[in-house]
Amino acid sequence: MTIALILEIETEYRIRLITRFDIFVDKISIITCKNKLTMKRSELFFSFLLLPLDFLMIILAGISAYFIRFSDFTTNIRPAIFEFPFDNYIKITLLVAFLWLPIFAFAGLYNIKSARKLIKEVYKVILACSTGLMLIIILIFVRRELFDSRFIVLAAWILAIIYIIFARGVVRLTQRYLFNFGIGVRKVILVGSSKTGDNLINKFSSDKTFGFEVVKRVRDFSADTSQELAKFVEDNKNNPNKDKRIDEIIQSDPNLTKVETLRLYDFADEHQLIFKYVADLLGTKVLKTELMEISGMPVIEVKKTPLEGWGRIVKRLFDLIGSFSLFIVLSPVLILVTILIKIDSKGTILFFKKDDGAPVRRVGQGGVLFDYFKFRSMIPGSDNMRYNELSDKNLRDDGPLVKIKDDPRVTRIGKFIRKWSIDEFPEIILVLMGRMSLVGPRPHLPEEVAKYEQRHKKVLTVKPGMTGLAQISGRSDLNFEEEVKLDTYYVENWSFLLDLSILLRTPLALIKKREAN
């Protein structure tokens, strides 16, 4: 599906006065367009269950905070100089719990979907509880006698976050466990003959936690196919077991014609099915668009990256706070590695000069070169061997990158620090200096960038990062095109939550075995 076709379809949908056209991409590159909100009975049950569960967790957090404050351990540290009868306290706690529930509802915490990512739910819980905390602070300001202990307020806030996240985690695990028995699984019709469709079928059948089951697959969406599927959907709709009815239709082939695609969308709309389509947008230049109206005509602006304006400010503040914190926490490791490198082999501690004495440089944001350094993990004067004596051992023959297995240049301590990516820890300083970011595409070598095709240079839109989407998705085992696609997706879909998710997943990626170190 070409960019022009995607934009044309989107414009036509809007001209048809479709009231909602939400697009998102998950890690298997499914883009979902939700035109109807259909929930299975199990989803309705779990949605309803969350309401009393949150209420109980808030009360439990309040009670826990109360007894912690008046426990012997706490009072020995800081004696309680006030009286707060439990009967009065529990009444206030019940009131606060009732006031917090509407806040949770506005935060979208009662729209449970199996596809929701855990990091987003945790973020919403923290945001909702923090908003509830602000409500309590306002009440304290208005009625000074309401709470006499700031400790109880803060402890209840922290415990509420912990308890609610834990309870929702149990609900999520229960829901996914029930998928193994077919309870709550969404029935899907797959349209298309592409390899992506085969991958989706394999993924849904092998990993039940996705909560999808492909019940029928068609290769195209001609008029005859439309009639065939209409009968299939209607027959299933009359099934007395509501959980057996068709829920969604997924277009798995991005190369369907415009006529077929629009027919498929209208079909889903007519039969009240959720419509999703898999588009190879990772290989295109357009992911983010903004629609505006000029003289009654829809005009679409292509966005290079959300990292503009406030997004750039938020990311830089996060980089400063995060890198400074990491530097403090990792200082003992940095000092220890410095000593070990010096003991293990002759040479500098940092790798910052090439064999000819020229400074090591990387290509940063906008193609600007910057001086780069990391812990030295190889014997001195061996950098250029990758292009000469060791060129036949290159594992990356699909692009300009060079990755060597069992590299003979690597020192004893170098093997260890490379395995755990400790050699890249000095990049924290480059983040503080503003040359790199905590999250982003990997730093690019000038000689590699010189071989990039035009479409590859999209990754230079943002600062390179210490970790990134490509690094946590396969590290050095990804081929060059896969790495570029992931980095391009990151550039075009950046969000603070995406950065946070990548950072939290990085430690797990480090312990995975990889082909080249």
Image (cartoon, helix red, strand yellow):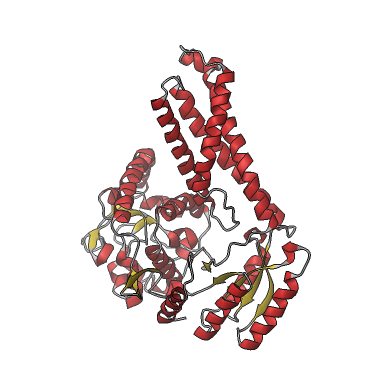
Task: Give the vertical position of 291 relative to 141 (above or below).
Answer: below
Task: Give the vertical position of 306 relative to 159 (above or below).
Answer: below
Left or right: 434 as drawn, with respect to 281: left
Left or right: 251 as drawn, with respect to 333: right
Where residue 25 sits: x, y (%)? 49, 65
Instruction: Give me the residue at 54% from left, 48% from top.
Output: 109
Instruction: Specify whether residue 2 is in view.
Output: yes
Task: Give the vertical position of 407 relative to 173 (above or below).
Answer: below
Left or right: 64 as drawn, with respect to 476: right
**Quadrant into which the C terminus falls:** bottom left
Left or right: 448 as drawn, with respect to 145: left
Where residue 58 sits: x, y (%)? 56, 34
Instruction: Give me the residue at 53% from left, 83% from top.
Output: 256
Where residue 29 sits: x, y (%)? 51, 68
Instruction: Give me the residue at 62% from left, 45% from top.
Output: 50
Residue extending furthest toward the right: 240
Give the image quarter of residue 116: bottom right
Instruction: Give me the residue at 30% from left, 57% from top.
Output: 380
